[in-house]
Amino acid sequence: GDSVTQTEGQVALSEEDFLTIHCNYSASGYPALFWYVQYPGEGPQFLFRASRDKEKGSSRGFEATYDKGTTSFHLRKASVQESDSAVYYCALDNTNTGKLTFGDGTVLTVKP
Amino acid sequence: GGIITQTPKFLIGQEGQKLTLKCQQNFNHDTMYWYRQDSGKGLRLIYYSITENDLQKGDLSEGYDASREKKSSFSLTVTSAQKNEMAVFLCASSITGEEQYFGPGTRLTVL
């Protein structure tokens, strides 16, 4: 079946550091890829999506590029802030029905 | 904008008990979802519904029932709660195939 692997379980950075969270997927066909962010006590929030090879999604300074060759959708941000501390989830939809497969999440902690 | 409301916020039950979680959305979305979130794990889909009275099983449907009484509401029933079960149950809605909007969750504890 389909799967999403997030390499980092936890990432600790200082403000203004560069962020990379790695996301690789395994799926037949051509899935849509998503990033969601979850703050404490809340449900996940949609960040952005990409649906085709080389498409870049972006929001709030975060970005990721769909790479079908390496089956990856890595999340990046040039300069993180303390307010970016949250759990980040990569997900895919291979059916176009909204049935998402999520990775295990990456806890980002940013120190001032 | 819209909102997703989940009730109750906290649910404590006894082993073997049948427990029901409720979800309401005012986005007028067709599709609604129930996920289970365990600590340190991603979200796993329990059930989803693409229209009123429709039900589709997710990867984690065993031990759960669901009901889509009307477009705006989607209920989840834990048919027999298991001791030491602790998880957050998240409801979401969307236009089918588009981004999902999540509620704040119901935290379940089984004694």
Image (cartoon, rainbow, N blue to C red):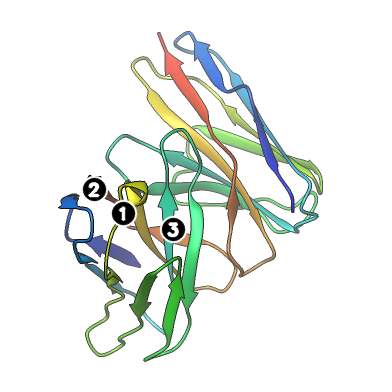
Do tag 1 and tag 2 residues touch (Cβ < 8 Å)?
yes
Q: Is label 3 in a helix, a strand or a loop?
A: strand
> Amino acid under label 3?
Tyr
Percent x, y of residue B59: 44, 51
* On screen, residue B24 above or below B84: below
- Parent chain of label 2: A
Location of mark 1 (residue): A81
Residue for badge 3? A36
| Residue at point 42%, 53% (across, down) | A37
Distance from the alpha carbon under mark 2 to that under mark 3? 18 Å
Residue at the spot of label 2: A110
- Which residue is located at x 22 percent, y 67 percent? A22
Lower sequence index among marks 1 and 2 = 1
Q: Check the image and name the residue furthest to the right.
A: B70
Disc 1 to disc 3: CB gap under 8 Å: no
- Badge 2 amino acid: Val
Q: Is residue B86 above or below residue A108?
A: above
Q: Position of residue A17 (x, y in %)?
A: 19, 61
